[in-house]
Image: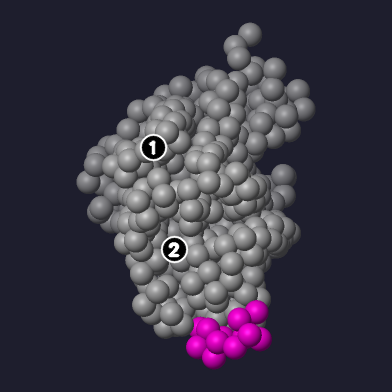
Amino acid sequence: MAKGQHLTGSALRGCIISVCGTAFLLFGYDQGVFGAVNSSPAFKNEFNQPNDDLQGIFAAIYDIGCFLGALLAFATAERFGRKGSIMWGSVIMLIGTVLQTTAMEKVQMILSRIITGIGNGVNTCAVPMWQAESFRSQNRGALLVIQSALIAFGHPLSTFLGLASSQTEPSSFSWRFPIAFQGFFIIIILISLPFLPESPRWLVAHGRIEEATNIFARLEGHGATITDTKVIEERDRVIASVEKEREIGEASWGEVFTEGGNRNISRVLLGAGPYMFNQWSGINCLAYFLPITFEKNIGFSRQLSLILAGVLGIQYFAVSWLPYFFIERAGRRKVLILSSAACSFCMIMISVMLKVNTKATQWVFVAFTFIFFDVFSWGILPVSWMYASEIMPLRTRNKGVALGVASHWLSNFVVVLVTPRAITNLSYRLYIIWAVLNASFVPITYFFYPETARRSLEEVDEIFMREKFGVTHTRKPGPKFRPDHDSEDLAKQDLTEKEDGSM
């Protein structure tokens, strides 16, 4: 028996969720770990007291690596498959982690941050696709909410590890250990992957129908075989979708940048949007440098700043589970619109409190920082990581998602690079910028983003086939999943709902 063949049904799905969750936890950990160590006296001494610009480069250059990794996924992931891409991305990350941990010179730290970022960039393309293509439409949103919550958990984990290891000052262990701990998650991923199946949709697209059918049966569970009706229907639906896409023409590198019958460039632009909303909300202005923000903007001690950042991260993790209960019912659009509006209000209040700058307003500043993370996690965070993989056609999904992730990391680089100097020079004005950007996401989402909740990937294809680029009329989630309805019946129900004007 091949590795992992005994895993079926909920056990198999649970293992896939666990590996994807570990990858997202690692992503969240990486977002917080450098903020936890770059203000360490031992770290500063190791690298000759880096100024604001060099601190920004140390943190932001990782995002350039992630950007390059997303482009690498764009070029190679169709060849290696979803699982193979995650394997290679994790190996690259492990190499970069070892080099970061042993860094004694500025150049080595910068190069190792780039290498680690390349691996993470590959994974942030491949992991959402692997998960989206392995689960039915009624599961995808809830599962990605879980992954978003794990991103949130990575942040306090890195902060508290930084706080704990800071007790070893002036030893370099105080900053090397939190960085080295990334390897723990990477090793879990590398050990688990050989026991798990490839994306069945990717297998169908590459003509490996028998393997895909077997995986559909294993994912179904309950003793299902390759001859069961549900398994055959799922396989045939995916085969029909692939064949329909192939009728339009053979995939090419330039295809994602042209509209064509599949509306590829429209989907690339719409898919990149939520990734960019994520970054231009200002979340990583705070997440990467939260202890520094509390130190420079308010004047708290390093210890108190780390404790507050850690407590905030725990709350962030706790509340980020809430979308699990409503994101499929409410839909992607509504939660994204409400989250963006709330984030804008929080940034306005943060700016006002910092401008007034009394003892009382300093703590109100902290309170609205906590609230900002909460409302961000209820909409912008989960939608940003699920939307692109839900709207891309199968034949170009890898390339389209890779471009979306690349836009995410390039935006992240710019934000993180300028933040240390912006905190020093702009003070309260910095948060006015984030407030305006968050407010702009509301009309953009309302007018241009079709609803994907409770729709299969094939049903989303039908939306883009019938709607021209521009204002969308698909503003309501799909019908509740009913097992006695096939995808054709659900698609007909969708057509009756598309004129509905609600979010």
Q: Earlier in the sequence, mark 1 or mark 2?
A: 1
Please give the residue where the numbered disc 1 appears in the rendered image.
103
Q: Is residue 434 above or below residue 53?
A: below
Q: Residues within 10 Å of mark 1 (few under 14, many from 20)?
A: some
Residue 4 vs residue 217, the one in the foreground: 4
Number of callouts: 2
Colouring used for the render = one colour
Q: Position of residue 7 (x, y in %)?
A: 69, 22
Q: Is residue 236 left or right of residue 116?
A: right
Residue at image x 26%, y 47%? 255
Q: Is residue 148 left or right of residue 355?
A: right
Q: Tag 2: residue type?
A: Gln
Q: Position of residue 177 (x, y in %)?
A: 55, 39
**Secondary structure at numbered mark 1:** loop
Please give the residue where the numbered disc 2 appears in the rendered image.
279
Q: Is residue 65 above or below residue 356?
A: above
Outermost residue on the front side: it is 170
Residue 7 vs residue 244, the one in the foreground: 7
What main secondary structure does the magenta stretch of the protein show?
Answer: helix
Residue at image x 64%, y 38%? 17
Task: Report the magenta residues as a range.
Answer: 351-363
Residue at image x 66%, y 60%? 307
Q: Is residue 200 above or below residue 214?
A: below
The answer to whether residue 67 of the structure is visible from this angle is: no
- Image quadrant for the C terminus? bottom right
Residue 292 vs residue 187, the one in the foreground: 292
Q: Mark 1 or mark 2, which is nearer to you? A: 1
Residue at image x 65%, y 17%? 5
**Secondary structure at numbered mark 2:** helix
